[in-house]
Image (cartoon, helix red, strand yellow):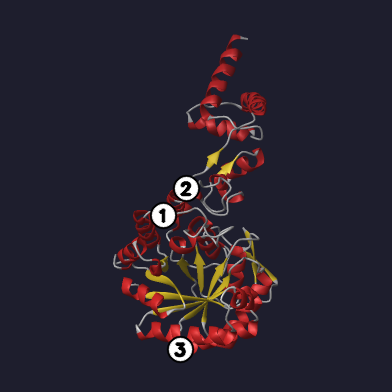
Amino acid sequence: MTAIRITEDFSAETTTHACDLPVESAMGDRRVKLDDTTLRDGEQTAGIVFSDEEKFNIAVMLDEIGIDQIEAGIPEMGGGEVEVITRIANAGLNASVLGWNRAVPSAIKASIDCGVDAVAISLATSDLHIKTKLFKDRAWVLDSIRKSVAFAKEHDVYVSVNAEDASRTGLDFLVEFAAAAAAEGADRLRFCDTIGLMEPFRMYAAVKTLIEETGLEIEMHTHNDFGLATANALAGIHAGATWVNVTVGGLGERAGNASLEQVAMSLKYLEGQDINIDTTKLYDLTDYVLRAAGRELSPSTPVVGNSMFSHESGIHADGVLKNPETYEVFPPEEVGQERRLVVGKHSGGATIVAKLRDRGIEVGREDAQAILALVRAKSSKLKRALTERELFTMHADYMEKKETT
């Protein structure tokens, strides 16, 4: 199998590899960590509400797959939010538990009181937000982030500083903002592409500059407004970012965030990372979260959707039957899925033979082609694929007619 790896200068490098070891890591010993914000940004998706029990269950499932950090919610909201975040923070999970906050000491204290070991301190950095949302100036922003980080570090917690609307922030001021936070002990900077308007080349350049100028660890927080959330996250990783903020199923405001499934499997198969994620549980996790959100898992969802491992085209199905690697980049079992051969208009004889053989029925090439013609005609008439029962009935009818003629 041949893969294309993009190097730091964006030149293409061809690598030959086996399916279970796709590429040599472009990142050396640097391991990328995943911070899941399904319980915060995911639940901020318009119209989505998780029950407290669902939030706790999701946190446990995230911990079981090996997520590094769980952004559990916003303690400042009070009420049930505080109760469930406190429960998660004190559940003895292996993952770090982080509370999200405005850059206000009282809000940060609400997180600390829940027992979290990490806090995110979020503050807008673009002039658009500063002037038209906050009605402040850059000096006020710098002063606020200094005071907030200093307050949090007094309580001995890990601090992520979130630069909201970083992608529309002048790079000089973004560096100044990051440096101010770093001076007070901030542990990392979250680069927030708040409205998803970055593209990978600009993202790479911005993140690389931030790391070179500040020395801070960078976390990618990318939105999918232009369908580039995962691509932008990977670009930031190539530039040196060590964290990615993700959501299960790509939930999040508007078009959503970078999805946990896509980022995890991209790190493993496109970047050669030895990720600390039990990918076999990704389908069950995604299915649970989307059901809790009142949504369905689309068949065409990358990585875990049913169509990822469903084959109807005769050429594709024949190839997969001979060697699954011909049309599957990784085995379905690796993400908790299963392979499906679909019987329909575009099927080939190999699918008919394989499906019938699964039932202990052997058919020759001539009979398979005759049954295939019937399958295609019926599928076209019904405008859908056929069920296995319909195929077996069709075979029985065909054989009965053949024997009487």
Q: Quadrant of the C terminus?
A: top right
Q: What secondary structure is marked by label 3?
A: loop
Above or below, 141 relative to 290: below
Q: Which mark is residue 294?
A: 2
> Would you say 331 lies left or right of 154 here?
right
Give the mark, 3 or 2, whose residue is nearer the N terminus: 3
Which residue in the structure is indicated by mark 1?
A: 50
- Residue extending furthest toward the front: 135
Report the front residue among 120 and 279: 120
The amino acid marked with disc number 3 is: Glu
Which residue in the structure is indicated by mark 3?
A: 184
Task: Please count the marks in the image.
Answer: 3
Q: Position of residue 172 (x, y in %)?
A: 64, 85
Q: Position of residue 149 (x, y in %)?
A: 44, 83
Which residue: 37% across, 73% down? 111
Q: What secondary structure is marked by label 2?
A: loop
> Would you say 391 lies left or right of 72 here?
right
Give the mark, 1 or 3, whose residue is nearer the N terminus: 1
As measured in the structure, the alpha-carbon distance from the residue carrying label 1 to the one carrying label 2 is 9 Å
